[in-house]
Amino acid sequence: MERKSWVMVALKQAMPIIIGYFSISVAFGVLATKCLGFTSVLMSAMVFAGASQFVALQMLLISAPAVIIVFMTFLINLRHILMSSYLCRFYKDQKITRRFLLAFGITDETFAISSRNLENIPDEYRFKYQITLNTSCYISWITGTLVGVCTGQVLPLTFIDTLSFILTALFLYLMVVNIKKKVDLVVALFAGLLSLAMSNVVGWNVLVATLLASYLGSKLEKRW
Amino acid sequence: MYSQVEILCVILGMALVTYVVRVIPFVGEADLEKYEFLKYIPVAMFSSLAIPDMLLHGGQISPERTIAGIIALIVAVKTKRILLTICVAVITLYVLLNFS
């Protein structure tokens, strides 16, 4: 296949993600209206990592210390290192600048698509394919955030206050779908209860509970 | 609350740590198989964020949020549908806060 058609393949495969990202980032923009305003578009453009942006938003809403927000972002995005370590084998011969560009757009979703397909794509077209996939999803993420903030401007503030429970429900949902075995359940319960018990030290409770519970999980895994 | 400068610092910090994590394997070799606790971070983090926020509001126990949260959990477990879970949770909370 010629170069142009690999761009089309990438766009076609990106379509579900583009639609998904758009709706999620609209929600992000609406919820961020009060505490970030249009700065949320900057966050989407510079961070481009959905789960961590929602986590940061929630922590900004409860006035957690800035350092903790950055550290939580680091922790939740650590998983990208596993995806990058898998993908980088396909780009060993690429120029360093190209690899720097590719790395920016790696998310759970772009990884899910490209890791399935890269083996079937000829070496010389892989960069073109991946950069098209990443960039189209990136544009959707930023556009959605912008649309969300604009929508948020016209919604009454009290309405947005009730809507902030969306974040709680979102995290409850993400917790549920991440519980696949007994250890996960124990980790979730331990983290939730510890974080609750420490809830007077805002921000730190999430950090300490996350680290201790994950450590507990890795230890239990070996025994069970 | 936060000043504009603080917000910008948070965003810059987030951008930096996120990019570093994404780019490291592309410039060097990273062997992370041995750090098993990494895979438990998402579930632990979502739970430690959600549980206090579902039970408490402004430091006090909130029965409305607790009920809405429990219903959200049930919907999430039964259907595994994200939008349904969120809609049911928010509507339940709205009804409990305004019509009871």
Image (tube, coloured by chain):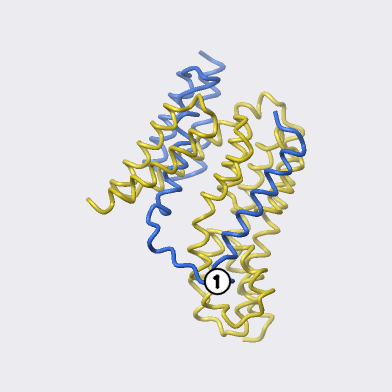
Q: Residue at x 63, y 80 (%)?
A: A94
Choose between A169 and A222: the one closer to the eye: A222
Tell me if residue A224 can be seen: no
Q: Residue furthest top?
A: B100
Q: Colour of chain A?
A: yellow
Compared across the picture, whether A28 is left or right of B55 comes to right
Q: Is residue A43 above or below residue B88?
A: below
Q: Residue at x 75, y 43 (%)?
A: A39
Task: Tally the marks.
Answer: 1
Choose between A115 and B27: the one closer to the eye: B27
Tell me if residue A197 can be seen: yes
Compared across the picture, whether B67 is left or right of A142 comes to left
Choose between B77 and A168: the one closer to the eye: A168
Q: Residues within 10 Å of mark 1 (few under 14, many from 20)?
A: few
Type of the residue with mark 1: Gly
| Letter of the chain that mark 1 sits on in the rendering | B
- The spot of residue A164 in percent (x, y) is 59, 31
- The spot of residue A161 in percent (x, y) is 63, 27
Image quadrant containing the N terminus of chain A: bottom right
Q: Which residue is mark 1?
A: B28
Q: Residue furthest left?
A: A224
Q: Quadrant of residue B32?
A: bottom left
Q: Quadrant of residue B90?
A: top right
Q: Residue at x 44, y 32 (%)?
A: A195
- The spot of residue A79 in percent (x, y) is 49, 57
Q: Colour of chain B?
A: blue
Q: Is residue A119 above or below residue A116?
A: below
Q: Callout 1: helix, strand or loop?
A: loop
- The spot of residue A115 in percent (x, y) is 50, 70
Q: Residue at x 65, y 70 (%)?
A: A131
Q: Is residue A164 above or below residue A97?
A: above
